[in-house]
Image: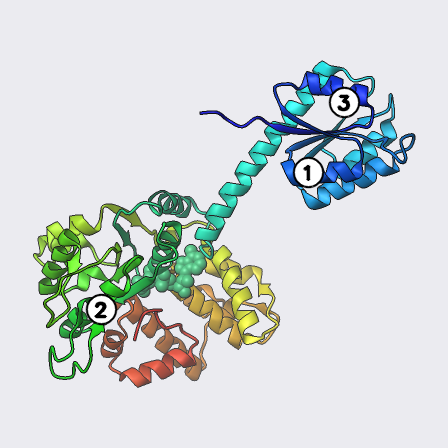
Amino acid sequence: MNTPKRCLLIVEDDVGLQKQLRWSFENHDVVVAGDRASALEQLERHAPAVVLQDLGLPPDAAGTSEGFATIAELLERAPYTKIIVVTGNGDRDNAVKAIGSGAFDFCSKPLDLEVLRLIVDRAFRVHELEAENRKLRSQSSVALEGIIGHSQPMREACRLVEKVGPTNASVMLLGETGTGKELFARALHRLSARRDGPFVAINCAAIPEPLLEAELFGYEKGAYTGAHRQTRGKIELAGGGTLLLDEIGDMPPALQSKLLRFLQERVIERIGGRETIPVDVRIVCATHQDLPALIRAGRFREDLFYRVSEVSIRLPPLRDRTGDAVLLARHFLEQAAARHGRAVRGFSAKALKAIEAYPWPGNVRELENTVNSAVIMAEGKQIGPDDLHLGASGGEEVLDLRQVRSEAEKRAIQRAMTKVGSNLSRVADLLGVSRPTLYDLLEKYGLKKPADAE
Ligand SMILES: Nc1ncnc2c1ncn2[C@@H]1O[C@H](COP(=O)(O)OP(=O)(O)OP(=O)(O)O)[C@@H](O)[C@H]1O
Ligand SMILES: [Mg+2]
């Protein structure tokens, strides 16, 4: 492959020197300019990575004002350009001034061409590295936007996501409740060529079996009582995009077979319909369950398992992500303070210790909820350990009965959510309360409902 030549702009009013320099850099794509206006024109036209610039330009060929004005304008329009300034012999002051105003390096007259070539070469290399760096950073930061974490296991998970995101492979996201499975599923979608297509999520645990089939595959008008009009299912709605099958471990066996058939044939039939409809969709699944154990127990089809987990990504529990809890806490604090208009600025040192020490069974969601309520409840500008209500780690024993009760209540709800994931009916069952009561309690304690819960 032919790599394009490196483009070098030479801004020099002395025609003789222009020629000499052009000749010295003949393996480059050299463009020249004799004054500020034509330098800017060449910049627009050729976008050179490196500029070699004389300070004495007309109309101030004897001074440096025009040279500095040119540097300023070049950098204003193309801030990543590397400018190498050519100064008069021993003119240290202007060399320093040039670097101070953003030039990359300098070289003094009379020019030692060998040295100059080295400087120019280095400028190109730095420019290329910086450009590559910017590209990498923008790619990952856009796609993995909002995913916070610097711990080793999180970095590995992110790297895997970046690798498989752009492919069509089916991905299984494994992790306890609240570890960010949905967040990662969305990142996979954003990294793929399907990013402009739909992202559709369905929670297999939250919907009873007969409804789940209709939700997934859709139905024709009159397919059953109540089917008043033709309705497309989630699979079809995700066409051209990504379908997240959340809590796939809870999918009833009959539907597992039907889903497998879809994955083999890539066509669906709506319930009560005859037509086969081809659907191009990428499947991402999530579960907090141990699928191999479900397979052994005969509750999950092994062939389906292999179809939907070409790549598995395990999201570690928060307690295994050293240092991340504090990072996330700060992030959620800023968000919550802005959302609720509270002037809470940060955590006390003791609160940060408590956050680090607590095992976070409900993972990131529990942390988010905890920080959210703390921001709402906190009296001062700083969140202390008591505002977090993390039990033992929080200083003095609490005897106020109302507080003891509400803390116990809140903890029970969080535990229940940890146990059965985002299925709010089951959470309510487990707690022995009605769904509306559960909603009130979630509201009262500032607990966030799982994103895809009904
Ligand atoms: N690494 C992270 N950085 C920032 N926010 C996160 C991170 N991980 C999770 N969250 C946030 O925590 C909450 C829970 O995440 P998410 O819904 O993706 O978890 P989940 O694994 O799907 O949970 P569940 O099993 O309960 O469905 C969301 O509000 C999400 O935005
Ligand atoms: Mg989820």
Q: Which residue is mark 1?
A: 43
Q: Do the residues under discs 2 and 1 have CB atoms within 8 angstroms?
A: no
Mark 2 = which residue? 233
Q: Residue at x 36, y 47 (%)?
A: 161
Q: How many other residues sit within 10 Å of disc 3, few (<14), some (14-19) or many (≥20)?
A: some
Q: Earlier in the sequence, mark 2 or mark 1?
A: 1
Residue 67 percent location from the top left of the image: 83, 35
Quadrant location of ligand 1? Answer: bottom left
Assign the N terminus to one quadrant of the image. top left
Residue 103 vertical placement versus 20 (above, below): below
Quadrant of the image occupied by residue 400 = bottom left
Give the percent coordinates (x, y) of residue 118: 67, 19
Q: Is mark 1 within 8 Å of ligand 1?
A: no
Q: Earlier in the sequence, mark 3 or mark 2?
A: 3
Q: How are the residues colored? A: rainbow
Under mark 1, the amino acid is Leu
Q: Is residue 392 above or below residue 181?
A: below
Of marks 2 and 1, the one in the foreground? 1
Please, what secondary structure does the residue beneath circle 1 have? helix
Apparent side of residue 7 relative to residue 219 in the rendered image (left or right): right
Q: Nearer the viewer, residue 274 or 328?
A: 274
As helix, strand or loop, the secondary structure at mark 2 comes to loop
Label 1: few (<14), some or many (≥20) within 10 Å? many
Q: CA distance from mark 3 to mark 2?
A: 69 Å
Label 3 sits on what residue type?
Gln
Tell me: 361 left or right of 42: left
Residue bearing mark 3: 18
Location of residue 156 by image quarter:
top left
